[in-house]
Structure formats: C-alpha cells, structure tokens
Image: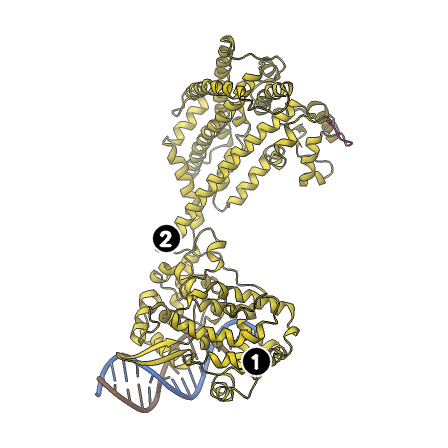
Chain colours: A yellow, B brown, C blue
DNA sequence: GACTGAGTAAACACGG
DNA sequence: CCCGTGTTTACTCAGT
C-alpha cells in the first residue's frame, strides 16, 4: 500500500547512514580544530624546523618541565625522608631508584640517543627518583604535545587528500622527522638543565646509568607511531574504537601491551634472585611470554620483530630468534635496569590507557550526539538481542515485557549499545520488510518492550514517518496504560497515535479503522461505559493470553503443561526460555498500576501458581514473578477462564487449581473463550 | 501446506 | 443525512 511504500522510503533514508563518514569527519575536525593552528602551516614548519612551530615550542615546554622538575625534586627529597621509596633495604632502595630513571630513559629514547649519550649521564638515587617523577609528568605532556602534532598532521593530510592531491608519505614522514628533531632538541635542553642541577649539587649522575633524563621525551618519540595510530584509529571512518585498541596493542607489542600483562609491581620491582629460566629467558620475560599468545608461536617473540630486539631502547639486531634469546638473556636479564624499564613501560601503558579511555569516551559522546539527532535518524545495527534461538519464546518474552508500559523494564538496548539509537529496533529487520501491507507481527516479536522502546525512540517515532514496529494492539494498550487512570476514549487513542507517531498522521481512515478493529477484536481491550461516555481499558490478563507461546511445535508439551502432571518433563531449553522470559516481568512488577496490576496478578497466580513451582529454573515460585509467561499463556489459552474482563476473579484461579482444572471448573470460561479465540 | 497472528478493507448498526 | 463509534466479516500476508 501507499503506506508501506512510504515507510519503505523512509527506511531507506536512514539506513543510508552516512554517520560513519560524518563521524570521522567530526572527529578529525574537532581534533584538529581544537588545536587552534592551521594544520598546513604547522606541517610545513615542522618540516623545515622545529622552532618554527607555532604551537608551544619545545623550549617552552622544556622550560615548563624544568620548573616542574625542580618542584618535584623538592618533593622527592621530602619523600625520601619519609621512606616512601622501595621497601627494601637501603641498598636496594638506592639501586632501584638509581636504576629506574636511566632505564626508563634508555628504553624511551632509543631512537634519539646513542648509547654513548645514554651512558653519559649518571644519576644518583635522588636524581633517579626525581627523574622518574619528572618523567611521568613529561611523558604526559609529551604525549599530549605529540598528539597535537599528530592531529595537525593528520588534519593536514586529510585536507590535502581532499584537495585531490594526496600528500606523499614522505611529507608526513618529514614532519615526524621534524617533530623528532624537536624532541631531540628538547632532550638536549633537558640535559643541560640536568647538568646544571648536577653542578648545583642537587643531583649527581652515575656513570653506568643509561641515558639522561631527557630520554623521557623520546619516550613519546618512541611511540610516535603508536599514538597517531591510536588517534587515527578512533577518528578514522569505519574504524571502531576496538580497532584502535587493537592497533595500540599491536604497535605496542612487546612493550606496552606486554608490560601491562605483568604490570604487577611486586613481580618486577624486587630484584629476584634468579634471572633466567631453563629456556634461557629471564623470569620476567618468561612470565610475560606465558601470558601472551605470541608465546605459542614458535619462532616468534613479542620482543623480537623485524630482526631486531624490541626491548624498549634496544633495537639490537638479531639474526634469528636464538640469537635474540641470547641477547635477551644477556642484555635484558632480570636486573634493576630491566625492572626499571618495565616500570617505565608500565607508566607508558598507563598513560596510553588513560588516553584510550579519554578517546573512547569522546567517541561515545560523538556517536551519541550523531545518533540522537531526531532530524536525522540513522539506522542502527540491531541493538536488541532478539533472543535468537528462542524465537518461539521470545514472543512471549516480549509480550510480558510489553505489559509494563511505564518503561521500568528497559531492554538490553540501552545497555548493549553505548548510544541510544534512534532507529527503531524493529525497523531494521522485520518491521520494514518490504512490500505489502505493514505486517509487523514479526517485528513485534523482535522488538523490545514497547514501553522502553518507545521511551527510547520517542523522538524518532514522533518525527520520522516510520511505522512503529508494534502491533496495533500493543500500541493501543500502550496508549491506554500510559494514562493515569488507564483508560482512554477512542478519540483519545487516536490522538495518542497521532501525537506519538508521525506515521499515523497520514491515512487516518486506514489506521483508525484498524484501531477500532483491534479494539473490538481483542478481548484484552475492554470497553467501559463511563460518565463521559465509553472508554477503553486494557485487560492485562487477556493481553498476555493474546500471545500464547508458539507451542505449536510441541503439542505434547503443551498438553503436559496443561495437565500439570508432567512439569518435570519440560525440557531444559524450554525451562530456560521460561526463566528468560520471566525476567522482564520480574523486574517490572511496579509497572502495573492498580488497575492493570490487579488484572495481571491473577494471571501470575493462576498460571504461575501451581505450574511454576515445579520449575527449578526460576528458583522461586514467588507469585509476583509471573515467571512462566508462556506457560501461563498456554494454560490460560487452554483452560483458563476467560474472566478476562476485569480480572475480578483473582480468587478462583488461585483457589481452584486451574492447572488441574483442565476442564470442569472453568467450563464456562472455556466455552466463552475457546470458541472465539482458540478454536476459531 | 496448514495454521495462526496481524493488517487492511469494508459492510453494517447505532446514536448524537 | 452525516459523522463518530463499535462490531463483524473477509481477505491477504508472513511466520511457524
């Protein structure tokens, strides 16, 4: 019909979803724009020279860091007094602290400093600690700084690409080079600063310590490829955060990632007596390997790649794995230095994790923003879990959940998806299946409780001319239950439809007729003569009955259930389904207001009461549970009295064992209902 | 292929 | 007579 075609078009529109593209675009834009400098300019400047950069110059940064270092130094001295450092004896304390900084430096500044340079700087305990703290600070600063640079570069790259002139990779490489030069410069400044400190007696350097303090900077340089990738990963279109995480993990393979796995300080910090294991690997490394999937791959090692040692700051070339192992054992044995390096690496990882968390948060916020735009509803991957595999029961579940219009029961939708999708759950799958009149029965099965679904996509349905994935019955019921007194006139129902759904602002004759048809057809809708005329109410019991579980497949099972004699015969899957479907109900007892609640309760008592108890899955036979919706449905359908009306017979059901009353007691009911509904 | 739920269309009755 | 409301029937479609 026309309606259908209309919905069809609408569906296609949102499904086109170019959200990804826009998302990425925004990401890039925000990231780049936030920096406040023109990407192009920055990039070129960087190519030529470090100082021409318009942003915070390395010198400035260094100056700032130096000031911080002084401050930290004072703090450190105080801390030393309080014995904050390593618990071990004085020696260990000294050695540990003494090693840490240099090591970290060494591992961080591999590319930047030559071994000689690194050896050059020696550090006493205090300096070590100072540097360590300073390092943390600078690490953060550098990472941010570097990130900015990368953002700019990325932005520039994008800009140029958009201009149809794909920038040669060299350009980017040059920029990175320039940036590294900047870093180097900063390192040098830092070294000078350190020397000054040394002269002043603030610190003294030990010869055997690997590199100077400045190496911290390089740490960022070590990760230059990592950070940008991480950033790109999140910003890149179609590249979910997960990918970025993966990338990070990959990039940091052997470093950050692995370090994280064995980040437990106790393991690392205290110098262990034993250095190597049978396999020749250091204890620390071994443990790391063990936890790593890489370990399993013979001939590979997380710390070995491209023929060189990936140990932070090492890069020693190794012909093969064997040589590498040897190298590991000799150069990276479990000593203070390695331990300190691990610590530093831990810091790196922590920083990255923090950064990742931040970026993830941002990504979510961006996605939320984009998806929540009512004007541009975007299709969304099915956020709901239609309970695959239990289709026959899912329906019951839905209906049960539907019984709580107040929205107390929220489908997994919101929980599952970080962002509340505007796109109606049912649209993607069944509700909009093409062609023909809108037959959304299936969608109804898939959709979450109408109340929550509506609550979440309220704006969407309100503005988008999309047919809601609910049946007329469920919509009518929702409309009625939304009102305080749980009753509506026909006209009010009409109004609710038009108010809530843009879709129902057209073809009024059609859907109004359908509404009337449903009101009359379904027993769950009860017409009540009111002072002001006739109003419609909902009989929850009937509504629940309306959707008997698809037990057709197992008539015997149904019979068994009805008889109430073979509850134990219920197969596990069915019981599981019962339990599953029961949860929604369990959570939403409050949803029922006096009126509907009263009507619903009987149901639970009737059907649940006897039958449920035997069911182990639910564990509790507590009436409020209504756990066995399907079950109850079945029973009701078959034998339950049709007191659908106003459920004024809560007693009978309870008192008289309905289950067993497979016939006699409720004859009248059966006669009333069966002919019409079941036997028809 | 039968059964069933759902949507649509239409006829009809009734009362304001 | 028109309109809104309510009931009922018939048909079709889709899922099981």
Looking at the image, residue A543 lies above or below residue A348? below
Q: Which mark is residue A306?
A: none
Does the magenta run of residues contain A277? Answer: yes
- Which residue range is magenta in the image? A274-278
Q: Earlier in the sequence, mark 2 or mark 1?
A: 2
Which quadrant of the figure contains the N terminus of chain A? Answer: bottom left
Q: Residue A407 versus residue A170: which sits nearer the camera?
A: A407
Does the magenta run of residues contain A358? Answer: no
Packing grade of label 2 (10 A; few <14, some 14-19, many >=20) is: some
Name the residue rendered at 63%, 33% in the picture. A254
Q: Which residue is mark 1?
A: A659
Name the residue rendered at 50%, 12% in the picture. A202
Q: Principal SS element in the magenta part? A: loop
The chain that hosts pointer 2 is A
Q: Which residue is mark 2?
A: A373
Residue A549 in view of the camera: no
Looking at the image, residue A530 lies above or below residue A86? below
Query: What percent of the width, then of the height, locates residue A115?
Result: 62, 17
- Is disc 1 placed on a helix, strand or loop? loop
């Amino acid at each position: 019909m026309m309606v259908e075609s209309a919905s069809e078009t609408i569906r296609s529109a949102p499904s086109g979803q170019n959200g990804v593209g826009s998302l990425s675009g925004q990401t890039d834009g925000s990231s780049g724009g936030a920096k406040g400098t023109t990407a192009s300019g920055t990039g070129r400047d960087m190519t030529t020279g470090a100082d021409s950069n318009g942003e915070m110059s390395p010198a400035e940064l260094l100056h700032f860091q130096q000031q911080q270092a002084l401050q930290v130094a004072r703090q450190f001295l105080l801390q030393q007094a309080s014995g904050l450092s390593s618990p071990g004896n004085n020696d260990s304390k000294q050695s540990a602290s003494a090693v840490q900084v240099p090591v970290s430096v060494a591992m961080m500044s591999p590319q930047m400093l030559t071994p000689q340079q690194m050896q050059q700087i020696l550090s006493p305990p205090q300096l070590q600690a100072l540097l360590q703290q300073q390092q943390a600070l600078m690490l953060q600063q550098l990472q941010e700084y570097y990130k900015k640079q990368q953002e700019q570069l990325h932005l520039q790259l994008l800009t140029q690409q958009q201009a149809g002139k794909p920038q040669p990779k060299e350009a980017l490489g040059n920029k990175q080079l320039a940036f590294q030069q900047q870093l180097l410069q900063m390192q040098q400044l830092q070294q000078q600063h350190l020397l000054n400190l040394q002269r002043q007696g603030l610190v003294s350097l030990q010869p055997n310590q690997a590199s100077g303090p400045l190496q911290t900077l390089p740490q960022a340089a070590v990760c230059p490829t990592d950070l940008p990738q991480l950033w790109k990963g999140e910003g890149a279109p179609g590249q979910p955060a997960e990918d970025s995480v993966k990338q990070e993990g990959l990039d940091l393979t052997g470093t950050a990632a692995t370090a994280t796995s064995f980040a437990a300080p106790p393991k690392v910090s205290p110098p262990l007596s034993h250095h190597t294991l049978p396999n020749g690997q250091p204890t620390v490394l071994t443990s790391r390997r063990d936890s790593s999937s890489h370990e399993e791959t013979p001939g590979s090692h997380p710390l070995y790649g491209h023929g060189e040692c990936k140990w932070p700051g090492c890069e020693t070339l190794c012909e093969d794995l064997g040589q590498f192992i040897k190298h590991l054992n000799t150069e990276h044995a479990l000593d203070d230095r390695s331990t300190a390096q691990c610590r530093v690496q831990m810091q790196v990882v922590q920083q990255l994790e923090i950064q990742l968390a931040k970026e993830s948060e941002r990504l979510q916020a961006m996605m939320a923003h984009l998806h929540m735009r009512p004007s541009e509803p975007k299709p969304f991957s099915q956020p709901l879990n239609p309970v695959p595999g239990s289709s026959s029961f899912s329906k019951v579940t839905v209906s049960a959940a539907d019984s709580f219009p107040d929205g107390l029961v929220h489908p997994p939708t919101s929980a599952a998806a970080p962002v509340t999708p505007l796109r109606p759950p049912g649209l993607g799958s069944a509700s909009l299946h093409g062609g023909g009149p809108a037959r959304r029965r299936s969608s109804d099965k898939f959709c979450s409780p109408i109340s929550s679904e509506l609550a979440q996509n309220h704006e969407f349905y309100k503005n988008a001319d999309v047919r809601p994935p609910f049946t007329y019955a469920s919509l009518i019921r929702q409309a009625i239950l939304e009102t305080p007194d749980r009753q509506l006139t026909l006209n009010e129902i009409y109004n609710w439809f038009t108010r809530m759904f843009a879709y129902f602002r057209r073809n009024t004759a059609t859907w109004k007729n359908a509404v009337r048809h449903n009101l009359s057809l379904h027993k769950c809708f009860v017409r009540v003569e009111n002072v002001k005329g006739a109003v419609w109410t909902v009989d929850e019991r009937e509504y629940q009955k309306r959707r008997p579980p698809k037990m057709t497949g197992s008539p015997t099972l149904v019979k068994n259930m009805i008889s109430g004699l073979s509850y134990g015969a219920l197969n596990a899957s069915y019981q599981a389904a019962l339990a599953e479907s029961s949860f929604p109900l369990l959570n939403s007892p409050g949803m029922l207001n006096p009126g509907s609640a009263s009507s619903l309760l009987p149901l639970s008592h009737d059907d649940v009461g006897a039958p449920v108890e035997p069911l182990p899955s639910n564990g509790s036979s507590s009436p409020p549970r209504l756990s066995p919706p399907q079950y109850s449905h079945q029973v009701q359908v078959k034998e339950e009295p049709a007191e659908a009306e106003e459920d004024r017979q809560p007693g009978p059901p309870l008192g008289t064992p309905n289950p067993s009353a497979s016939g006699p007691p409720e004859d009248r009911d059966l006669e009333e209902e069966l002919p019409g509904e079941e036997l028809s």
